[in-house]
Image: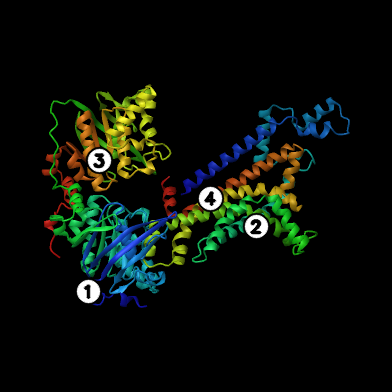
Amino acid sequence: MDLAARLSPAPATNTSAPLLAVEDLAIRYVSGGTSRRVVEGVSFTVAPGEVLALVGESGSGKTTTAQAVLGLLPANGAIESGSIRLDGTDIAHWPERKLAALRGARISLIPQDPTTSLNPVRTIGSQIAEILQIHGERNRGRIRARVLELLTRVGLEPAEMRAQQYPHQLSGGMRQRVLIAIAVALRPGLIVADEPTSALDVTVQRRVLDLLDDLRREYGTAVLLVTHDLGVAADRADRVVVLRQGRIQEAGPVREVLAAPKSEYARQLLADAPSLATPRARPIAPPTAGTMLKVAGLTQLYPMAGERSRVFRAADDVNFEVRAGTTHALVGESGSGKTTTARCIAGFLRPTSGTVEVGGTDVAQLSGEQLRQFRRKVQLVFQNPFASLDPRQTIGQIVEEPLWNFDAVSRIERENRVRGMIERVGLPDSVLTRPPAALSGGQRQRVAIARALVLKPRVVVLDEAVSALDVTVQARILELLDELQRELGLTYVFVSHDLAVVRLIADTVSVMRSGQVVESGPVETVFHNPANDYTRDLIAAIPGSAGAAGKAAP
Amino acid sequence: MTRHLAQRIAQALLVLLAAFTVAFVLLQALPGDAVLIKFLGSEMGLTADQIAELRVAYGADAPIWEQYLHTLGNFLRGDFGYSIRSGVPVSQLLTENLPSTLRLSLLALAAACAVAVLLALLSQVEGFGWVRAVARSMPSFFVAVPVFWLGIMLIQVFSFQLGLVSVIAPEPWEELILPVFTLAVPISAPLAQVLIRNIDAVFGEPFVAVARAKGARHQWVLWRHVVRNAMPPTLTMAGVLFGELLGGAVVTETVFGLGGLGGMTQQAVANQDVAVLQAIVVLSATAFVTISLAVDLVMPLLDPRLSRAVSAV
């Protein structure tokens, strides 16, 4: 088939007819003899050129629905009933051969994680060229010209050079641009964007979404935007469908749903989603509290690979103080040095220079048994509750383990403390004998918190501790952390890329970039009156900050 | 790149020296020595004094570190010494026996790779679920087959009963068919297993979903995306297995009555022929080191991410 004909804009369709109409869709997964219906009675339409957001938490069926539209359900998933009409034709039960011809040409995909979504052993150029080749283009000159045109259009220049590069030579944002170039290459009528920017830093996210918006307008493409982020939906979508456990909770124009949600669940979701509009309810910490943590001149250097004379400054003269019983946030994008700083505070990394004083002790000077004893004062909670708990231990053993290492107490005493701690983080006794696999993400993070607190530490370093959780779960964990802090007088160091969350939980904040603190101070001051350009950029990039009301009418 | 190459070669040489040293120490630690075995029990009726003189003549009485340096020096000059048993230079034994073993091993490796690739491709055919199932169960079956049993069975069936392959006065190529097959079967099993597992894993990668979303069909995805990504671990495995092949050749050569390193090793062990054993150990180590060096150098061609690591080191 002639590519030139395909590349011309799609024939004008009757605007009243939807491009995509999903009706009463039900999808079932079969695994290990049990079968589960994960999507039920889902109906929605997408008009040409429209952006429809499918919003929901994990397990809501939003990704499954999107996969069904592409005809790319996993092997154990099947459409049970309902229809998926594209331009009026039901494709729900089309055979693979026919669907393949459709994919890329009429419907295309922008995937979630740009770092794993490009073939690592092939050049960028060949991966863009591929979609043209699959759909019948054989002329090398035309392919090359189109590849360079697309690379230029998505802002990857010089295009000739980029075409020769491999994925690992590009940043995450650049890779997502490549994937967008692939998705728009044949000017499809519909793009399925499955959490297209969730893996990217906020400022990158904004630029990538802006690019997608531009291209969509230019080509008149409709977008089915799958996202967990209400802010992204608010900023980018015309209409929104809220899903929960495979069923639609609410659907309608974005502004109406966000301004006045009718369903219970949508209200809950909206209330739990941290945004800059959410009122802060943190009491001002008593100014009398002494300094618990003092970081001064902290610098961490790494030799640059290949060049012995040059060093990489992971942390560069970082200074801040945290008063006892308060929360200090370290915010920044990837590579800003926030995690390096946190690791130095926890004593897992000895800084090249500078001091980290916890309750008057310089962590950087400790070693051996002293360092080990120090660890009971500073505990860590990690981002991924699925990876940070030993899958072969029971919850009881996991929470008990720190006691074995530090306290020679009786078995009864240990059991009581573990039981008390589990209760304190809001879990039932019955979890004690279960393995982590039997728990949800939010429950696991509660276990990780219990494990950190069982030694009664003074400082807890929370490294992106709520970033992997759904918003409603995230809200509950943040409440728990807040309660525990007030009750136990804990000092938190809260490492996060999410400014909206930081604003809710932190008292003071250091904004980091390229290893340096660019701005530091009380949260109110930094957020309402940022002195630094980068801080302003970061705050402006938070999805939803434009506000539902700010979105221009389509 | 050249610096990396130089580093890798230096490492390889270090491994060889270590292999030489360990072999030397272990062989010296054996109770008795070849001189005693050859002359003490024999009907020559030599007195203890005469044996002591012989030991001096063979250099067996010198301090161990002196023997070590002496032997090492000789090896570096390409002089592997003399077989104590037969008095023939070890290098001559090697020239006689090495080519046939090398030919057998290389053919077996090639055959094993072919079988592994075939099984891996069969494990991915569309439709025909039973073909996939059979292809996937073959590796564990293959690995369970003992080499000596397989060799004997093949001779029984193909030579004696069917008369397809002659084992008595065969043509040079005919002589190799059954041994190559015998040797290839157990080697192909881990190769096929690694390849199948990797292909499955790569099929689960997000970039495969993206390729499908571009409209690519199964075969297109398999050949243009999956195969090359599944190759590197398989190549590493093949390199390790080649070393094992040299060992496997001992049994195979014995079963099929082929001359080669196998028979030579067996005799040298029986006679505690230290000079021969030392040469065989160093030779095997050289083969191993050369193969892994070659694998390391080919790898960046398959995976560009590694060439970055290479240029950055």
Which badge, 1 or 3, is on the more N-terminal residue? 1
**Residue holding disc 3:** A477
**Residue holding disc 4:** B236
Q: CA distance from mark 2 to mark 1?
A: 65 Å
Q: Secondary structure at mark 3?
A: helix
Co-location on one chain, circles 4 and 3: no
**Residue holding disc 2:** B107
What type is the residue that disc 4 sits on?
Thr
- Residue at (27% x, 48% y) in the render: A470
Which label sits in the foreground, 2 or 3? 3
Q: Secondary structure at mark 2?
A: helix
Tell me: residue B26, above or below residue A185: above
Q: CA distance from mark 1 to mark 3?
A: 45 Å
Q: CA distance from mark 4 to mark 2?
A: 18 Å
Q: Residues within 10 Å of mark 4 (few under 14, many from 20)?
A: some
Towards the viewer: B167 or A420: A420
Which badge, 4 or 2, is on the more N-terminal residue? 2
Is residue A391 left or right of A352 when viewed as pictured?
right
Q: CA distance from mark 4 to mark 3?
A: 46 Å
Q: Position of residue A183 (x, y in %)?
A: 31, 65
Towards the viewer: B6 or B248: B248
Discs 4, 2 touching: Cβ within 8 Å: no
Q: Residues within 10 Å of mark 3 (few under 14, many from 20)?
A: many
**Residue holding disc 1:** A17
